[in-house]
Amino acid sequence: EGLADVLSCYFPLSFSPPPDMKKSVTRADLLLALFRAYTSTPEMFPQVVQLLEDRFPSPKSETKVDGLQLLQMCLEKFANDLRADYEDESKKAELEALIDQVWDLLRGQILRSEPMLNMVNASGAVVPKALEALKSLADLFSISSLKVVDLAFEDEDVKKALVACSSTEDLEAESKPHIMMHCRALDVLSTIASSSVFVFAGVVDRTSAHTSILENISTQPTLLIHFVYKMTCALEPLKNDVFSDSLGVFKETLPELCSKLLAYLAVGSQDAEDNYRTTSECIKALDNVCKFQSEWISMELIEEVMMGLLAFSLSDSRLTTKDHIIHTAKIISSFHEAHRRQDVMDKVITKTLNALVGEVESDRALLFLSVIAECAEECTGECTELSMDIVVKLTQRAIDSWKGEMGWKSNRVSTSILSMVSVSIMPHLYECNCKLGGIPKPVSKIMKNLVLLLEKVLESQETGNGLFVHILHSISYATLLCGEEMQKGYVREAVALLLSEEQIVLEGKLLRFNLDSAVSKELRYLLVGAVLNPLKSAKDVENVEDVLHSILEFIMTLDDPNVARELSISLSGIVNKLEKNQLDEIVLPLVTEVLLNHMKTCDNQTAVEVGFYSLAWITRALAMKKYSKLEMILDEMFSILCSPDYEWEMSTCLDLGETFSLVICTQYDNLIDTWNWKAKLLWRQKLFSTLSTKVFAKFEEKRGNPNVMIGLHQIFSCLMTSVHFSVLKPFAQDIVVNLIHSISLLLEQDLPEKRAVVANLALLKLALTDDSMRRVIQDHIKSAVEGLVAACCTPSTTSRDILLRRRALECLALLKDLPHYILFPYFHDVRRRLQVCLDDSKREVRQQAGKTLRLWTGVST
């Protein structure tokens, strides 16, 4: 008792280490030392219980958590001594009184009397720790006694929960905190049930005496599904004892229990929050049941559950969310991994493919198949037949669903399939398996389907939608998934498509298509580009110079900008992987003698725009390699954009400026990394220095030509966002001046696309937080305020206009940090405009206008 009195002075532990000892001495270390002292002898256990009775009324959750950890440590450390005392009749009564005290301590933390809005967050770590301690208490007597079970079922809160489970009335009439209290009480039962099969059976028997789970689960799903889920979790630590006769009653209820749970998924409740939580627990309970040993659950029942979960995922039920679809797909994937039942998976895939009809159903079905394909890879760490089979069947379904009609909606299913394949499944397969050699046969089937689908898209002239790009990307991914020998085979056939007679194509075993098709030529070049683009090196490409010339010459004949765009990317991908000596020998003549000569002599402006797009991508490929003669090519690009000979219209200048931006933009970085483009260290910073100098010079030179200025500002906008803010600081004067000028210029032209203005406003907002740039803004305050005020009142036609107004208001708010005498001349005009913004149709704009107006009100004082 003396030791306990001394130790009690240190609990709860309050400790702040000295500055020089923060790492050497921690609160956790001292707490552990205190706990070891308390658990030094079983005689301390009554003292611990008394201590916690005194300390638990504290409102601090830290005190409760520490106390519960101490209690659990005592229960585990003194387990053998306490069991021995319980078997000793002379000590049993005293120990039972002590157990009653412990029970009261724990129930006070688990079944809290104050209202709770959320089971998990209301009490933080207190309830989980209390349940862990309760589990340790139940473990003490789980083999020989139902003492803890008796205490639980005698508790008033547990009784109320069991009565609620039997009620035929709608529990929605009760407040959510009361329902959560009932769930917490049921957690007590499931926690003690996990201590042994003996206790588990006792809990099942006592619960059955109060309520019939199978009969009432449809009327009280929130409570009973929660209880069923927790009870299935309680069986996990008892899996080695499943042969016990004590569990026979529970085992017999499993088939009907699964049926009841599946039935709930088809109906659900009205409350959205309850729906999500209860549905999640229902799915988890079914997952737990299916993981029981075969002696407990038959394969037929597992199959029934799998198909029921599938039906739920594909249905239009209000219960079904994205999270639930992903969860059920993972369950079915785990089932396949455990049992290797290909017949069941064939049924699953077939049924899912048949669901590709409506908009919502198609999205759910594709998400479901995507998760299964990706999970199969994660489970095995290699290319699986299941994953590849899913891609084969999806691409075949895309072919079957293709209607050949104009318009995205008529081919929605095919587009959605290829989007999922290209964006999700194929990248995941490549990420997991590109180093493992691949599986040739399924890849060949996928490639065959993709080629056929590409032919159909070209014939229908539907290259403007995402499907066209998704097919080409999927072909590139399929090439990457091949083994080394098969990949070389694709490369040989691709080169033969361009440089050999047409009959060579007929002899090819990999890239086969209809030579009589009206689009066979476009198809041929697109296939070559898609196959060669992702290669790690151009060494395996024979006659690479002829290949590059052939592709570029074909690009210059194209009328379809979408085909030209994809071929330009593929062409530059090959250029990027050439050796250093090949750049001077092959690429420079290709650009100067072929491409630039064609653009300068061509009278067709559309053809010049197509050539400019190819030039931009080739320039990017060279910039990434820090090509020594890059400046010469950049000068040629500026001369085309700024040349008076072309007399570009504003819309064309806008497009050319955006095309020029491809040289340095970050938009395609992820794709370029996937296609194995080579990049030298800090290439973008070096290109920024070169380009910014040229752009600023062109600003001065072309200031009287608004059309060309529009194009230059598109380049400027992308240039400023392509590097880290710290790289901009040496150019602060030029950047800020042109940044302010760009806002007014771009707004005056009333351009339909406001991306550049929004980006420049974001940069201006960042500049206003930097001292050096803010001083430059101060020198040009009149232009800055006028531009920002005009941006605040931009008419709302797109979502980007809303963002533009909000960004402008944020910049105006940051101007408050400038000196008072600088801002005061503009106070009244800014305030009038801000008051107009208070009536904006969008809440986010109104809120920002209010904040900005409050800040500017201080300017007047």
Image (cartoon, grey):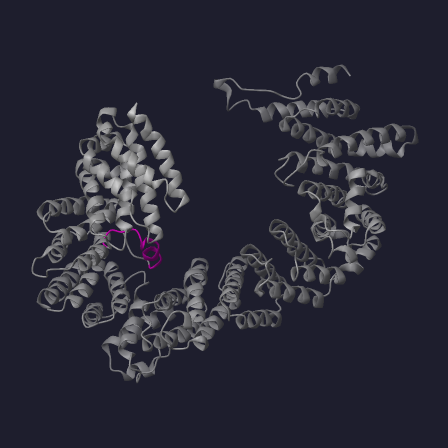
Q: Nearer the viewer, residue 508 or 5?
A: 5
* Residue 624 in picture, x, y percent from top left: 24, 52
Residue beneath the point at 53% across and 67% down: 386
Q: Specify whether residue 674 is painted magenta.
A: yes
In the depicted view, which residue is nearer to us: 393 or 356? 356
- Magenta residue span: 663-675
Residue 723 visible in the picture: no
The answer to whether 303 appears left or right of 392 in the picture is right
User: Which quarter of the rendering shows the N terminus?
Assistant: top right
Q: Quadrant of residue 586?
A: bottom left
365 drawn magenta: no
Q: Position of residue 516 (x, y in %)?
A: 30, 85
Quadrant of the snapshot with the C terminus: top left
Q: Is residue 712 left or right of residue 43?
A: left
Q: Is residue 61 above or below residue 805?
A: above
- Which residue is pictured at 67% across the width and 58% down the height? 286
Q: How many marks?
A: 0
- Residue 41, given in percent of the width and then of the height, sits at 76, 24
Q: Tell me if residue 556 can be seen.
A: yes
Image vertical order of residue 820 relative to residue 444, above or below: above
Relative to 252, does residue 31 appear above or below in the rendering?
above
Residue 67 location, x and y as percent? 69, 27
Which residue corresponds to the image point at 82% horizontal and 31% vertical from the top-left?
100
Name the residue: 21% across, 72% down. 558
Q: Is residue 345 left or right of residue 414?
A: right
Depicted 284 relative to depicted 426: above or below: above
> Which residue is more in the foreground, 644 or 176?
176
